[in-house]
Image (spheres, rainbow, N blue to C red):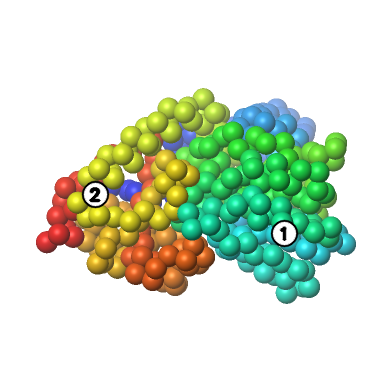
Amino acid sequence: MAVYLDCAATTPIDPRVRDEVLYYLTREFGNAGSRTHDFGRRARNAVESARDHIARLVAASRGDIFFTSGATESNNLAILGLAAQSGKRHIITTRIEHHAVLEPITELKRRGFDVTWLKPEPGGWVHPDAVREALRPDTLLVSVMHVNNETGVIQPIEEIANALGDHPAYFHVDAAQGFGKDLPALQHPRIDMISASGHKLYAPKGVGALILRKRDHARPPVQPLLYGGGQERGLRPGTLPVHLIAGFGKAAELALNEWQSRRDRCLHFRHQLLESLAPLNPTIHGDPNRILPNILNLSIPGFDAETVIEAWAPYAAISDGAACSSATYTCSHVLSAMNLPHDQIQGAVRLSWYHDSQLPDLHRMVQALNA
């Protein structure tokens, strides 16, 4: 049976998180908005406890956490909701963002906003000086991802935050890939908005958060995109999925306690993987000193991605890049922005694992391409 190595697309649910989800799905099933009985109060307590756990991961406060259906919704809410009432019309972002950021920003461009698209360095990261130099008096928003979903390259978020300094522009970080895995950067107080998804952190699909950190005692003036119900202080209406939120909270609690040991195990897995695949002379895409320990984007000389995926299918479940766009079979906009040679782009595959992943039969994987 193939080993699942597509954790950048979605992670397996942690058994401890599963137990939390089932408890609030089947035992404590009350509505967090019900205020007249203990069922509702217990559900509300579970939601607030989850806010606390998620807030601790990024050195925020409980009141900064707004629950959504995932990072895609959080990105849209942050970008479109911030632009709804501002007179400023300039946005800075990068050419390697996830489509959940690129598309709402493209929509704003259609509405008349001026967008600066920053190119990455050859190693797949955006230089903080490029962000600083792009700032203008009318810059409303800077949106730079935490970890690239295709290459695993960690962006210099702390340095970018420092480069923004006292400029009034809001700083948004799509942290879907790195949330709970690379902790210190997201704790920087200059980051105004953070988007996160539960299913990238061993929690269920269908739950995420938008973190709106206060600056000068005021949160970013994000406006709702939906109306009705008044939940999440009017910013994101709809009955809260208490079981999913409780699961996300449990996952955040575990991540805070275990992130260093998880990181070490992922690094060990990476070392074994690269050592065993060395006879194939793989080319790693992205600065190896900046890559998250659980993601590798590589190409094997002489093979296209489809051939590699098919040859390795009996041993490992991998992808050809971003799961959200893989159905289109189009060339990666990320690798293209990095100016990689065409054959490397055509051959790029992504392997991504987690701290409890088992190694596949690497010897047979090598043999499958050497036959």
Tag 1 secondary structure: helix
- Residue lying at 16% horizontally and 51% vertically, measured from the top left: 364
Residue that badge 2 annotates: 277
Q: Amino acid at mark 2?
A: Leu
Q: Position of residue 51 (x, y in %)?
A: 67, 34
Q: Residues within 10 Å of mark 2 (few under 14, many from 20)?
A: some
- Residue lying at 58% horizontally and 62% vertically, measured from the top left: 119
- Residue 238 visible, this angle: no
Q: Furthest-left residue in view?
A: 371
- Residue lying at 76% horizontally and 57% vertically, measured from the top left: 135
Image height of 138 relative to 352, above or below: below
Image height of 60 relative to 288, above or below: above
Residue that badge 1 annotates: 134
Quadrant location, the C terminus: bottom left
Cα–Cα gap, marks 2 and 1? 41 Å
**Between 272 and 364, the one nearer to me in the picture:** 272
